[in-house]
Image (cartoon, grey):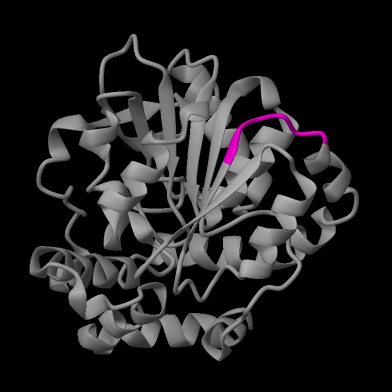
Amino acid sequence: MSQFQSPMRAWPGLQEYARTVTLTPSGLRLYVYDAGASELPVAMLLHGLGDEADTWRHIVEPLSARYRIVAPDLPGFGRSDKPMRAYTVPFLCDTVLELMDTLSIASATLIGNSLGAVIAQFITLEHSERVRGLVLIGGMLLTRKQPLSLAMLLFLLPGIGEWLYTRLRKDPQAAFETLRSYYANLDELPEADRNFLFQRVNERVWSDGQRRAYFSVLRHMAMWVMKQQGGLEGKLAQLATPTLMIRGEHDQMMSMENAHALLDIQSSAKLVTIPRAGHIPQQERPQALLDTILEDERLA
């Protein structure tokens, strides 16, 4: 048995907020960080593809002064259930709404990173009454120009993607190196973060359930997002929900063209760029991200 096959541990400081929530009626069990006073307005934090709720480790406590924070591991990822099924964006959206219902949350500010941003924006378009405010970090449904690396193109190929993913089990350092394109400078992260990510990325690589969910989401989303483009601009033009887009200056996954396209279409959208950050600014520049969210009076 590999050292990376042990249960995932919470980032130190988050363990006290961890709980398992059994959804009603599906029965899915989600691992959730739940922080902040129950009477505060709720902010739901939704992580990206292949990530977990620990991605928010540096902002959960500071944000909990303003919001009740609910940050789940999405199904198929982290410590949540990984059922044998297709992992589609609508399924993930339904799960988030079911989590809100199970916790008796009528509405929330949705804060999503990458895949989490796509989920948050789709929920807002389909159920605007459930969303008080929207924060899109490094991702959105609208696609004008979407950069794709060779590695991502290979991952889209059935069989080849799984082989490339699984072979990383032989080389923990190589698994860690796959993270570089998501950061402006992985080496500049504090040592505690780098050690945590080294352990975490290898735990992901050794999880058969997470591998299955990862490729299911990735391949479904590639076609699903394209199909959503028809009529999307009209829906966005009518969307009044306060929307804050946040993009890392060196984000290789979300193009500036997409961000500016949303600004041109949706009058309630605003864009802020985080200097010296890549695709995951909540990890690289957490204070700058916090300041950006807290300074937007529309989200108060």
- Please check the rendered image and state whether residue 242 is part of the magenta-colored stretch, yes or no: yes
Q: Looking at the picture, does residue 269 appear above or below residue 156? A: above
- Please check the rendered image and state whether residue 291 is part of the magenta-colored stretch, yes or no: no
Q: Is residue 157 visible?
A: yes
Picture quadrant of residue 14: top left
- How many labels were placed on the picture? 0
Q: Residue at x 40, y 70 (%)?
A: 278
Q: Is residue 87 left or right of residue 112?
A: right
For the residue pair 1 and 246, the one nearer the viewer reads as 246
Residue situated furthest top in the rendering: 39
Q: Is residue 21 left or right of residue 49?
A: left
| Residue 141 drawn at (x, y percent) | 69, 54
| Residue 300 drawn at (x, y percent) | 44, 23
State which region is magenta.
Answer: 238-243
Q: What type of secondary structure mainly makes up the magenta span?
A: loop
Q: Residue at x 67, y 73 (%)?
A: 146
Q: Looking at the picture, does residue 192 appear above or below residue 158? A: above
For the residue pair 113 and 200, the one nearer the viewer reads as 113
| Residue 6 drawn at (x, y percent) | 17, 60
For the residue pair 218 and 297, the one nearer the viewer reads as 297
